[in-house]
Amino acid sequence: MNRNRSRRLTYAMWIAIAIYIGIAIYVFWHFGFTKLPPPPI
Amino acid sequence: MTTPAGGASSAPDEHDSRGDTRKIVGILAALAIFIIVLYGYIIPLQGGFISSTAIRADDLLGADPQFEAQMPIQEVDLGASGRSIFIAFVMLTHILFANLHLGGAWVLLSLVVLDLAFRKERYARLGMSLALFNVILFSAGATFAAAGVLFFISLYPTFATQGFHIYWWPLLVEAILFGIEIFFVYTLWFTWGRIRGAWHVFLAVGYALSIYFQTLAIDTFVSGMLTPGEKTITWGAPGLLGMPWIDYLQWWFNPTLWPLQFHRVAAAVSYFGFLIALLAMLHFRDRTDPPSKKYWDWAGSFGILWGLVGLVAQPLLGLWYMYSIFSHQNQAFTNIMTGPRAWEMLMMIGLLSLLIVTVSVYFIERRERLLVRLGRHDIRNLFRAFAIVAAVAGLVLVQPAWLGGIMQFDPGTWANPLGLMYYKHIAILVLVAIGTIIIGIDLLVLREHRDKEWGNLSRASWMAALIAGVLGSWIVIIMGYVRESARSPWLFYNIIPVPGGQTYPTPVPPFQIFVVWMIGLGLAFAVFWFTSRVTSYHPEREEEV
């Protein structure tokens, strides 16, 4: 694998990791904070 | 390329680095303290020793008499919860063997693809070892499954009659897939290096898909017990379909089927990854020749990364699963989140937190020399920060939401201000982010530099990988227990009760299930290690890198 291709793949994987963390935040917001029961006040 | 298991020859690889074993002592101490506080303080103060049979006694009075026990109850001489203990042992141990395939098939597929793409001996060697390991242990998993069915029929005949009738078609599919699955994995191992790459990938994909659909078939049953598709069981006329097709679809594709299925796959991948790490560490200690030391060090790291991949996927899928239970079986949700079984969730998330801490420690210790050599003090510090932040997140996650009552909102309970779910959601997100970034750093930043370091495994990182293997396996059977106890005292929720009423309380009490976990894990690890000794291919010469 040439260096440029390897570098592009590395960037792509970092972007994928960032997207995954973004999805995790969305899922926890969507289910955890808005749909599951709120804590008692 | 390979040697049979057993003999090793040359002198041991000189490597005197012990690493910081104080971190390992800290992990073990944290685990011990957590278990002691949980069992000695939290469980009693949350009503965890009171059976669901007693707590839901009024609900049981409304059970349809036709679904009560029709025959004398068969006891097994293990006390009042003996039947449940018996089934828990058989099925939880079965899970440890069955997950070798559900998770292992995807890891194996990755090795087939890596072997095809990079032609490195280590990929083929580990792939062949794992394939043979799974071929040999296939019969053990299938034996536990078949035994479980027999025990269900003997110990819970009314449930078995109704359940096996409703799920006849999915169970038939599952039975057929046993044959297809072993065909694929056996052929995969047997033909390694003998057929073209595309065909080999086909076999690996076939193995993964067959076990995926086999699990889906049994999950229609398992999920349907927690969230049945109908309010009662209504049979129709004799024929290929015992009830209307639409009713069957409701039962099979019930509301928790898909979240359970995907969560199981992620958990199995994680479990298998950490198990590879555990076995690799034992081989590392067992072998004395440098090529083997390097190879098993690499295999341990490969396993830890797969374990971490499965681990960071689970909280998202778990939240989806919990929301499905909340929406469709609210009482079961309250049992395990705001009721007497909440300690089980605390235990699961506590071990998950400790697992992330342990993996962080593994990477701190394992990559120490490499990071110093590369001058990457930023990554060193980041790994250290991850371990500390994960420990803090873990402390948040193990906070009980309340104490002093069976239900969180019972009058007179003490609400723990640190136990709010909002804080816990944030803490879990932090753990997911840490796990994901560790994967990224190790795979993307350090990948090209790691090869020179294999073999220099410090004692601390060796122990961290071992602990990760134990925790990763333990979590799997805790999750199985959580699902089963969530629906206690019902077998099919609100339809078929555990027969015998107050004389035979469920779920399995906390101390008894702890013993079941230990026996199941001990048995499985012993079988895995002795099998691995005869199914593992070791390098006979230094690999060119």
Image (cartoon, coloured by chain):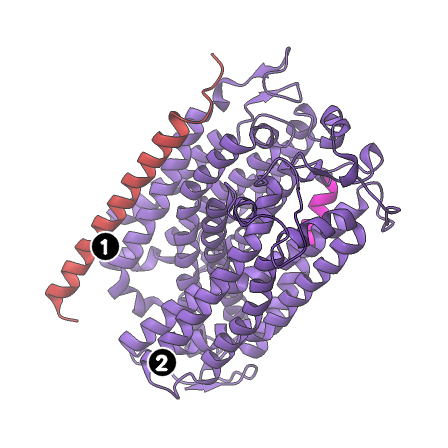
Label ID, residue B199: 2
Q: Which chain is purple?
A: B
Q: Colour of chain A?
A: red
Residues A39 and B258: in front is: B258
Residues B21 and A41: in front is: A41
Q: Is residue B517 magenta?
A: yes
Percent coordinates x, y for residue B173 in the rendering: 56, 63
**Going by the image, does B65 lie left or right of B8?**
right
Q: Which residue is painted at 57% across and 58% down in the image?
A: B170
Q: Quadrant of the C terminus of chain B?
A: bottom left
Say which amino acid is labelled 1.
Met
Q: Which residues are magenta?
A: B511-519
**Going by the image, does B356 lie left or right of B400?**
left
Q: Nearer the viewer, mark 2 or mark 1?
A: 2
Percent coordinates x, y for residue B85 in the rendering: 75, 47
Q: Which residue is painted at 15% across and 60% down in the image?
A: A7
What is the chain letter for disc 1? Answer: A
Say which amino acid is labelled 2.
Trp
Contact between labelled residues 1 and 2, with CB atoms less than 8 Å apart: no
**Image-quadrant location for residue B405:** top right
Q: Is residue B327 above or below residue B179?
A: above
Q: Which residue is painted at 54% across and 23% down in the image?
A: B401
Percent coordinates x, y for residue B40 in the rendering: 69, 31
Q: Which residue is mark 1?
A: A13
Q: Quadrant of the N terminus of chain B?
A: bottom left
Q: Residue furthest left?
A: A4
